[in-house]
Image (cartoon, coloured by chain):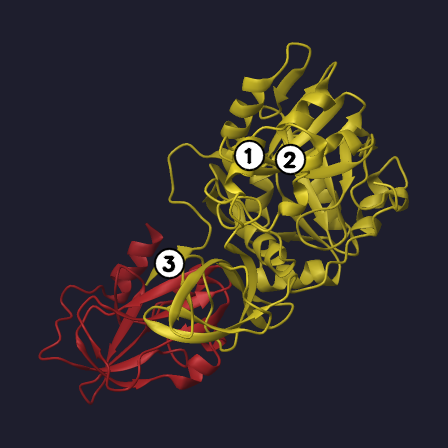
Amino acid sequence: MTTEILNVEPPIPAHQRTALFEAHKQCGGKIVPFAGWELPVQYEGVKAETLAVRANCGLFDVGHMGQFDVWGEGATAFLNTVVTADWSKTRVGRASYGLLLTESGGVLDDVMGYRLEEERWLVVVNASRVQRDEELLCSLLPSSVSFRNRLDSQAMIAIQGRGAETILQPFCSAALSDFMFRDVREIEVLGEKCVLARGGYTGCDGFEWMGSAGLAPHLWQSLLEQGAVPCGLGARDVLRLEAGLPLYGHELRENLSPYESGVAFAVKFDKGEFHGRPGLLKGLQSPPQQTIRGVQMMGRAIARDGYAVSCGGTRIGEITSGTPSPTLDKNIALALLPTQLLLGTDIEIHIRGAVHPAQIVALPFVPRSTKPTPKIS
Amino acid sequence: MNTPTDLFYTESDEWLRREDDGLVTLGITDYAQGELGEIVYLELPEQGASIVKDGSFGVAESVKAVGELHSPIAGEVVAANTQATENPGLVNESPFENGWMIRLKPTGEANFDSLMSAEEYAAYRAA
């Protein structure tokens, strides 16, 4: 048997380890290489971990994600000329999703910006894109603005699920019930200052803790003792797919525009100039022909990244991510397909030479259960 | 590690059993099922399909991994374990017994010389 673990890269000699590496080994995590890091793909099992997050609370080590501090006079205006979203409208204490584009308007990365002060931000980016993002930001950085990659000291834990607030609260200096979805504050957790935000990448309620590498193992252990379940990259990928959220390298790529990737909501043309805007506008002279759609398999076969999709025998696109959904007990996928396909259209997925029936369905597959966003953003 | 002594083993973690009637039964080892994790989909060939030496005879998939199954011998598929395709968890629970995968009628004289004994396989996986 030759095993391929999905989304995992072939081993390379020098992988980095997060602050929680030893904790993962102690808990029986199955370690795999991912985006230059050694991380657990699972502990007990992907299915059980996915369901644990849906039922109560799971913990994810996301210490591999890039963390950039951007601060100084004009920091907000600077970031607003680099990301596609309008971060000038993001209030202090709020987080905002945005994209970085290539010159030609393709997606360089998708990022979260946490506005900690008027002119001080924490920007969290995909591990596989850290270098490209840093190069872009630093190439455009004005002299009044400072940039720091937290790589040498970073840690990040996502506490996800409806039980997250109760499990995390005992260690926090602030009332977590005051945090709305995408609120962010600098508070003390276990007596040490950190950045705490409400949100995540699972479609469930939850929090993201960004703090010191030194404290991370202590917090991880404390949360486990409160009943949180350790979860790996596998469950994280299943949950984001169930929530219909895109992943860099799959739905998001340099050769796809935000419209094709299904993240056009994060592009605010009306705010003025931003990096990649001219290229994106040029590409939009003809309307996008393809976009990311939801797919549900009719049988038991599992659609995976790269499988061909046809409709009535004619090839129309390909799968970008696919998985069994433990929450729905169905096999689901995202695919790059013609924009005009109606919901309910019958399609075929080509798997190892055989044709398997599937259907276009609405996204998300599982309704999101994040805490409501306040009226004013 | 559980490695029954009456079986032959491959480096890619399949096992083979020579049955009294000349047929050969194939499956994956306890180690292999552990590496895959909870198997949720098993695809096996139809009865009558021919398998080439070192060719693929199906896949076993967990939520986040796809394992391609290889046969070190050529032959015709006499039976596939439909109980296991219906309930792939059988492979996790009982990889050497109820979770068997296919029975092959070997093409010509099947050569088992290049395969490992239980002792050799255990040492290979412990290395």
Chain-order first, disc 3 or disc 1: 3
- Would residue A29 be visible to someone looking at this image? no
Chain name for mark 3: A
Q: Which mark is residue A101?
A: 1
Q: Are marks 3 and 1 on the same chain?
A: yes
Chain-order first, disc 3 or disc 2: 3
Between the C-alphas of marks 3 and 1, the distance is 35 Å
- Would residue A231 be visible to someone looking at this image? yes
Between the C-alphas of marks 3 and 2, the distance is 39 Å
Q: Is residue B65 above or below residue A71?
A: below
Q: Which residue is mark 3?
A: A3
Relative to the observer, which residue lies in front, B107 or A142? A142
Q: Which mark is residue A21?
A: none
Q: Which mark is residue A84?
A: 2
Residue at left 37%, top 44%? Answer: A10
Q: Callout 1: 10 Å neighbours few (<14), some, many (20+)? A: many
**Which three-letter amino acid code belongs to the residue tagged 2?**
Thr
Between the C-alphas of marks 2 and 1, the distance is 8 Å
Q: Colour of chain B?
A: red
